[in-house]
Image (spheres, rainbow, N blue to C red):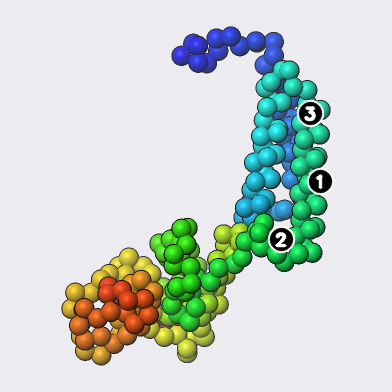
Amino acid sequence: MKKIIWEGAEWDFLLEIVGRSVIMFILILVILRLSGKKGVRQLTLFEVAIILSLGSAAGDPMFQEELPVIYAFVVLFSVIIIYKFITWLSSKSVFINKILEGEAMVVVRDGMFDLKHEHDGDFSKMEFFSELRNQSVEHLGQVRMALLEIDGSMSILFYPEDEVKYGLPLFPDDYKKVESFQLYDFHACMYCGFIEQLHNRESKCPRCRHTEWSKAINTKRN
């Protein structure tokens, strides 16, 4: 523990580390303000990469005696200039903007999960369940369209109360595979949310060909 914590430390350099850290922290705040972003929730993948670059450039001069702080000044301001230039470039070109920031992804359309992205490696239906529940969505029949924005937030368009239809439940107490079917009951495909009146539990969903069904609900939004 002695070797890990303090052996070999230069005690007279500790105060300098504090000063370096204060300077770099203030500099990072200035750089982030210059970037024009107001919060982490607004950051895209491109901007996260910029933040990581800033952190790497700022971290070393905080405790490495042989690195003068002026080096970090040059790196940080160079990064922000590059960021501003690429941001301006992406505002002029839709193609470049899509490469750097991606596109909003349709998650729910007309009360069902959109199947266009079903084979995407980062497509996690349970994550979408969580995001929808966080916005007080009880079942997919309440949702006309839901978009996953490029910053990770979810944008939702709801059906009017008189247009809410049967949908796949999103809360665990209702999201269960049914074992017996009652004639004329509405059921929802547990994979895509397709609604069907089933006669037996072996029925395949005509939309995605899966065979697991949950009892659909049509409760209104509060």
Residue 31 seen in the current view? no
Q: Secondary structure at mark 2?
A: helix
Three-letter amino acid code of the residue under disc 2: Ile
Q: Which residue is mark 3?
A: 71
Give the mark toward the camera: 1 or 2.
2
**Number of the label disc, if any, that sits on residue 81:** 1
| Residue at the farthest left position | 180
Image coordinates of residue 118 in percent, x first then y, are: 44, 67
Query: Of marks 1 and 3, which one's residue comes earlier in the chain?
Result: 3
Tell me which numbered mark, 1 or 2, is placed earlier along the sequence. 1
Q: Are marks 1 and 3 in contact (CB under 8 Å)?
A: no
Q: Closer to the observer: label 3 or label 2?
A: 2
Quarter-of-image position of residue 194: bottom left
Q: Residue at x 21, y 86 (%)?
A: 199
Does residue 32 appear in the picture of this structure? yes
Position of residue 95 measured from the top left corner of the image (x, y, whole percent): 70, 64
Question: Quick check: 210 left or right of 66?
Answer: left
174 with respect to 14 (left or right): left
Q: Earlier in the sequence, mark 3 or mark 2?
A: 3
Give the residue drawn at x 24%, y 81%.
203
197 shown above or below 114:
below
Q: Which residue is mark 2?
A: 96
Q: Residue 151: which quarter of the image?
A: bottom right
Name which residue lies at 31% across and 74% down.
Answer: 210
